[in-house]
Image: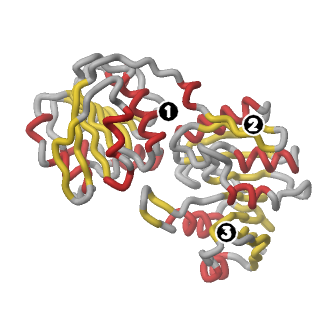
Amino acid sequence: MLFSQNSQLILRHTKKFKTKKVFFFGNIQDNFPEYLSTIETKINFQKYDDYKNFKKNNIKKIDVYNRFLVSDEMIKNCDTIIYYWPKNKSEAKFQLINLISHFSTQTEIFIVGENSSGIKSAPLILKAWMELYKIDSAKHSILMSGFLKRKKKFILDHFFKIHKWKNFFIKSLPGVFGYKKIDEGSKVLASTFSKNITGDVLDIGCGTGFLSVSLFYYSPNVVMTLVDNNIVALRCAQDTFDFNRLKGKIICSDLYSNIFKKFNLIISNPPFHNNLKTNFHIIKKIICDSIKYLKPKGELRFVTNSCFSYHDLLTKVFKRYFIMKKTNKYKVYQAFLN
């Protein structure tokens, strides 16, 4: 089994956990929780594909969750936290404060992460509730630990940001794409929408729900289905729709994994990063698999950075395609089945 560099760092301290009841959370990239010897292990994934893949290979019958927020029920009996620091500080703070709000004082907390992710700010972020100390480092990763000294109340509304676009309001939480502001690439894609769009539309990787909301602005009679792999993003999309009194089907899905119908149009602003590394796997899968989920004369429309070309892939998969719009930073592809 190949473990991430963060898990390898924890592996050097396995003796600490043999008598512990451990709760794992955060940016876990492997099956390490299954191999760590403990009295009891529980784990919460916020990405549906991580949850699905871990559960499929869960030999030890560990309690595995895919929940928006941590609850008292989930952490029951646990006395130790192992938290994998994500790629940004705001997401880490959101997850950690939710996490520690359910644990009693004197709970031991281990935090591990890559230097480039901002983990060095963890002691400052959490100083009101605990003192964290570095206990190990290797291969550009750090492992810290400390004991919870004071309880913290978690209030979800304190973490929401609300952005205004036209006469709509977009709600977002840390860790969801477009948290700090509405993404410029998404705005470029939204600017190509018109009243001519009709029928069933699938928003892949919906995030806050901005693209679906903007499509409703131009074409209020479309039937929207929104999917995302991140359960926090799904909550944002649902809150955005509720706030604006819009209706749509919002589904937890790893791209097309939970989609069982066809659409007139598929829209997306796909990521090209996996954590801190460039990765084009998602956009390639969106393009290649889209033909299974498009109706006759169906269309795939997505935005990408101007520096990336998908000519070869689109030519193989679709009868015809166009670059619908181009700016200095972004371009919108439009591809048709026939």
Secondary structure under tag 3 reads loop
Q: Are marks 3 and 1 in contact (CB under 8 Å)?
A: no
Q: CA distance from mark 3 to mark 1?
A: 33 Å
Q: Is residue 54 above or below residue 328?
A: above
Task: Determine crowd level at label 3: few under 14, some 14-19, many 20+ residues with C-alpha closer than 10 A.
Answer: few
Relative to 117, 2 lies left or right = left
**Residue under label 1:** 68
Q: Where, quadrant-wise, is the C terminus in this rendering?
A: bottom right
Q: For the residues carrying marks 1 and 2, which lies nearer the camera in this image?
A: 2
Q: Is residue 307 above or below residue 266?
A: below
Number of marks in the rendered image: 3
**Residue under label 3:** 329
Q: Are marks 2 and 3 in contact (CB under 8 Å)?
A: no
Q: CA distance from mark 1 to mark 2?
A: 21 Å
Q: Please report whichever mark, 1 or 2, sits nearer to the chain's N-terminal start.
A: 1
* Relative image position of residue 87 (x, y in whole percent): 42, 50
Task: Determine crowd level at label 1: few under 14, some 14-19, many 20+ residues with C-alpha closer than 10 A.
Answer: some
Q: For the residues carrying marks 2 and 3, which lies nearer the camera in this image?
A: 3
Secondary structure under tag 2 reads strand
Q: Please report whichever mark, 3 or 1, sits nearer to the chain's N-terminal start.
A: 1
Q: For the residues carrying marks 3 and 1, which lies nearer the camera in this image?
A: 3
Query: Looking at the image, which residue is at 64% across and 53% down?
Result: 204
Q: Please report whichever mark, 2 or 3, sits nearer to the chain's N-terminal start.
A: 2
